[in-house]
Amino acid sequence: MSGMSGLLRSALTGLAIAALAAQAAFAQDAGEDVIRSHGYSYFGDLKYPADFTHFDYVNPAAPKGGEIALDASGTFDSMNPYSRKGRAGAYSWMVYESLLGDMLATSEGLPADTYGEAYGLLAESLEYDAGKNWVIFHMRPEARFSDGTPVTAHDVVFSHNLFLEQGLQSYAEAVKRRVTGAEALDDHTVKFTFAPGISRRSLVDQVGAVPVFPKAWYEKTGARLDEPRLDAAPGSGPYMMAEAEVNRRIVYKRNPEYWGRDLPINVGRHNFDTIRIEYFADDSAAFQAFTAGEYTFRQETNSKTWATGYDFPAVQKGYVKLEDLPDGTPPTPSGIVFNLGRETLKDRRVREAIALAFNFEWTNESLQYGLFKQRESFVQDTPLQASGVPEGAELELLQSLGDVIPPEMLTEPALLPHTSDASRLTDRRNLRRAMGLLDEAGWPVGDDGMRRRADGTTLTLEFPIPSSGSATIGAVVENFVQNLRAMGIDAKMEKIDPSQYTLRSRDRDYDLVFDNYSSFLQPGTGLMQRFGSQEAAFSLFNPAGLASPMVDAIINAALETDDQQMQDAALTALDRALRYELFMIPVWYNDAHWVAYWDMYAHPETMPPYALGVLDFWWADADKAAALKSSGALR
């Protein structure tokens, strides 16, 4: 995001001085090069040394206690976050831990001020050969599940195998090809072996990030990972589920017996005694509840609400605090996704014509108060963002891949979104261009004004959205559909209940959908899950069903890089290729976190770049909470 380049480049190129300090903790056996460490990164550099006392961005003296309450829209019927069926309750994943990192840190379980580094949690250390053919984790014997039973290497192996047998197919298929063995060497030592002849990327960190479940609980209950249920397996994390009232409320309480509370990785974190989630039918109802104090922290994503809604009495009286906090992560690549499995949408000219119906400039000015920027890239505002024509190392890499790269990719600038007239919804210039593309693709306008092929088939598009979503998203889609209909396309927006929407999303029962992919700042085998061809037919992380030999080749090249310069060149090429494939209409992004909260919370003065961290390293101010209650502002 804007303003992050210096920080990000430091994270990507490696913090050399700290790396040397971390390398001093590494040892080698006489007979075999073996690396031993308290943490892991692919190039071996770690910001925090083995004797670190806490992460730099936390407040080590943060008080423990108090409650934070957040909102969720829609419904839930399960506390198992890993099932394909049902809708999992908010934050149901956070009760679990992994060998490296935990679920409450950044989305990858990593520290919020570095990228691509992980530190031991259930594991106190790890060792692996220089070729990364295997890894051994040495676990902390004091680790316990919330029911008091020890966390062992047998639980780790069981959890790994459970995901392979009952987890998402795209995940299982990807991991089976890469991880050939998982073995408990003793109660607190676990070894993983990796397939030969493949990239060494995302092997150690992959197995180190698997949530660990209690084997004995699964065997006793007969529960399955792929089925929804409200009685979730105990976790080893700092929080336990205390209450789950379907479609109304979830309460998590901090485990007073949490085994890892004094570890350096946990100092200054997990500060609330209670985390309460209140459910509402839609975002409008949720906002009204916030104004009444039914919950106490809100991260705002609706530009209209942020611009006009926060003038209610509690704000005017100073009871509610508003903050615009910097966000240093690449924005989530969200937008209008094409289902490439639909025959109609396989034609790139049709997709380009449909994309021209989206008017970002008018949308931003008329519906979003001019508060957003238009996203161009999958790694927006980072050094990896492709721009202009390829040159240098990026050009060399693309040329080395041969015929799989279209010639125009080598000579034309990276694809940018079209521009539109902000003064009117329908940009006549873009409309004419779109009409020409549709004519060229064999979809002329019939006598009734609708576009049909020669066989009489009408160009029809279904665009479902969840009824619990924001009114602004509904308005954006509605106006986009209006422009499509002006082109002669039989386009329909369908507002459906959240459960049905979830089911249709999983089954790819749509032509267009408002969805997102993941940004990337380093290579990893997860890139294949999100963008690769092999799992494209069923991966839930690839809502377009993108299957591109060009993208596959670039991902494979990125996975094989062994130095920072070539890695960055490969990822820049990947951004260029993903934009070229035009499987998503990019929409908008925000380079800040908009947060509103009842003035009873605090956060570090200097926020880390890669996480807002409200449930991670914020804390409650007991005096302020008492003052709000004594004034009658909160019950």
Image (cartoon, rainbow, N blue to C red):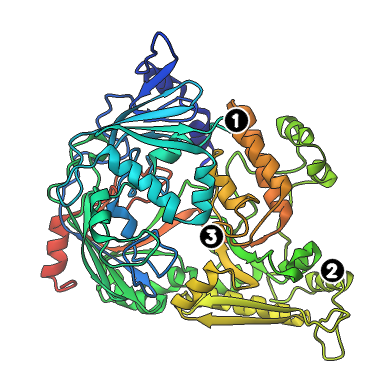
User: Pointer 1: what residue?
Assistant: 197
Report helix, strand or loop for mark 2. Answer: helix
Residue toward you, 321 or 538: 538
Residue 161 image point, x, y percent: 40, 47
Q: Amino acid at mark 3?
A: Leu
Q: CA distance from mark 1 to mark 2?
A: 45 Å
Q: CA distance from mark 2 to mark 3?
A: 31 Å
Circle 1 packing at 10 Å, graded few (<14), some (14-19), many (20+), is few
Cβ atoms at labels 3 and 1 below 8 Å apart? no
Q: Is residue 189 above or below residue 143?
A: above
User: Pointer 2: what residue?
Assistant: 437
Residue toward you, 115 or 527: 527
Res. 356 visible in picture = no
Query: Residue at the spot x=44%, y=73% of the render?
Result: 308
Quarter of the image where the C terminus is located = bottom left
Q: Is residue 472 above or below residue 330?
A: below
Q: Point out which mark residue 540 bears.
A: 3
**Disc 1 versus disc 2: nearer the observer:** 1
Q: Residue furthest bottom?
A: 448
